[in-house]
Amino acid sequence: MSTGNRPRVLIADDHVMVAEALTKLLEVDFQVVGIVMDGKALIKMVSQLDPDVALVDIAMPLLNGLDASEQIRRTNHRVQIIFLTMNQDRALTAEAFRRGASGYLLKTSAASELPDAIHAVLRGQHYISQLIAGDVVDLKLEFEGTNRLPGPLTSRQKQVVQLLAEGHSMKEVGNLLNVTARTVAFHKYRIMETLHIHNSAELVQYAVRERMVTF
């Protein structure tokens, strides 16, 4: 962040009204550099725009916020990621910090809490919504050693799960990921084998349970 400039914020939320309301709330003290509607666009825009802070919803199409954050963290350790979500599940909060979050804020929080959260993470601090008891250390200790996934999935496999659960056909998933439908079918077979599930309905249930999609 350049000295004298307002902190630059990127918003990732597929609900247009929410994104616009966030922009109006923040534009007095911050520079909103962009709004994106899905996780893949978030990764691309973080690379192109180099924001100071990204406000990220967890449930987004094409790639959910958790997986997008994890991918961003592999190449970018500067941007501060704040998850802004309706979900106050403590295990999910802990998972968000494991994936590279600096903050976790509920959409039901007071509007004044968001600027406080942004300023806190820009100072190098972690921030958790006042509506969720405890701090990051508490959460990490509480869920230390746990793994939300029954078996290890690669980033590509997670993408396939999410896209199939969103209702895309194998051909459509292949087009989105630039692979053949046959490759998607292979991924699906390996995923089901790894997760010990037996049909597409169970795959969708898994995606919902892991907050990859919401219905």
Image (cartoon, helix red, strand yellow):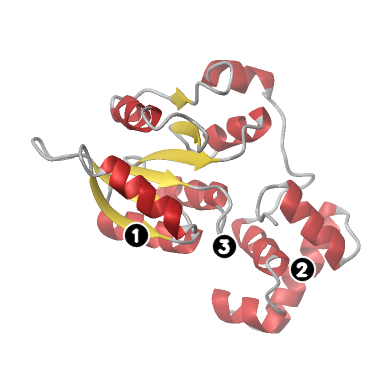
Q: Name which residue type carries label 1.
A: Met
Left or right of 99, for residue 188:
right
Q: As drawn, which residue projects farthest toward the right?
A: 198
Q: Nearer the viewer, residue 186 or 210?
A: 210
Residue 126 in the image: above or below residue 169? above
Left or right of 122, for residue 19:
right
Task: Kindly state the secondary structure of the residue where label 2 is placed.
Answer: helix
Tag in front: 1 or 3: 3
Looking at the picture, how far across and down is residue 75, in whole percent? 39, 49
Which quadrant of the figure has residue 162? Answer: bottom right
CA–CA distance in space, label 1 to label 3: 16 Å
Please give the name of the residue rendered at 74% of the width and 44% of the height, measured from the top-left corner.
Answer: 149
> Mark 3 = which residue?
61
Q: Name which residue type carries label 2.
A: Lys
Please give the name of the residue rendered at 49% of the width and 32% of the height, measured from the top-left corner.
Answer: 104
**Residue 45 disc label:** 1
N-terminal of the pair, mark 1 or mark 2, is 1
N-terminal of the pair, mark 2 or mark 3, is 3
The N terminus, quarter of image: top left
Number of labelled discs?
A: 3
CA–CA distance in space, label 1 to label 2: 29 Å
Looking at the picture, how far across and down is residue 6, in whole percent? 16, 39
Q: Nearer the viewer, residue 107 or 145?
A: 107
